[in-house]
Image (spheres, grey):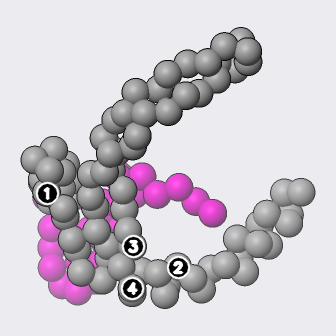
Amino acid sequence: MATITKRELVLRITDQLGAKGMIFTQRDVHEIVQSLIDEITESLTQGDMVVLRNFGAFQVKEVAAKVGRNPKQPGSKVLIPARASVKFKPGKEMKEKVATILQLIREQQAATE
């Protein structure tokens, strides 16, 4: 499985739009993608939930404080403070599409073992 970077995403979107007859430069698409990321981030920092229908929802949740262990000194306990964390809940359509690749994931895991 490949890792898709923002750059790769911009190239793919530019190509898809070009195939539909809509001509945007890579710079235009990059600005749109970056604006989307910035708006989602800003909304989350304001405590808002961001819902993109058929894709999913982003929400800030509190992760409670807990006691952990220092790997260099397993006998000592370390207090890990509470923090805010972004959680993503996929939408129904995304769940259904992603569920179809389970066999591919299993085959790749078996190949690496």
SS type, badge 4: helix
Q: Are marks 2 and 1 in contact (CB under 8 Å)?
A: no
Residue 29, label in figure: none
SS type, badge 1: loop
Disc 3 residue crowd, few under 14, some 14–19, many 20+, Cα 10 Å = some
Residue 48, label in figure: 1
Q: In this picture, is 4 found above or below 95?
A: above
Q: CA–CA distance between discs 2 and 3?
A: 10 Å
Can you identify the residue that label 2 sits on?
98
Disc 2 residue crowd, few under 14, some 14–19, many 20+, Cα 10 Å = few
Q: CA–CA distance between discs 3 and 1?
A: 17 Å
Tag in front: 2 or 3:
3
In the rendered structure, which disc, 2 or 3, sits on the residue that comes first in sequence? Answer: 3
Residue 25 visible in the displayed image: no
SS type, badge 2: helix
Range shown magenta: 1-28
Q: Are marks 2 and 3 in contact (CB under 8 Å)?
A: yes
Q: Position of residue 108 (x, y in %)?
A: 77, 66
Q: Quadrant of residue 103?
A: bottom right
Can you identify the residue that label 4 sits on?
92
The amino acid type found where label 4 is placed reads Lys
Q: How many marks?
A: 4
Q: CA–CA distance between discs 4 and 2?
A: 10 Å
In the rendered structure, which disc, 3 or 1, sits on the residue that comes first in sequence? Answer: 1
Can you identify the residue that label 3 sits on?
90
Q: Residue at x 15, y 73 (%)?
A: 23
Q: Position of residue 5 (x, y in %)?
A: 42, 52
Front in this rendered view, residue 27 or 92: 92
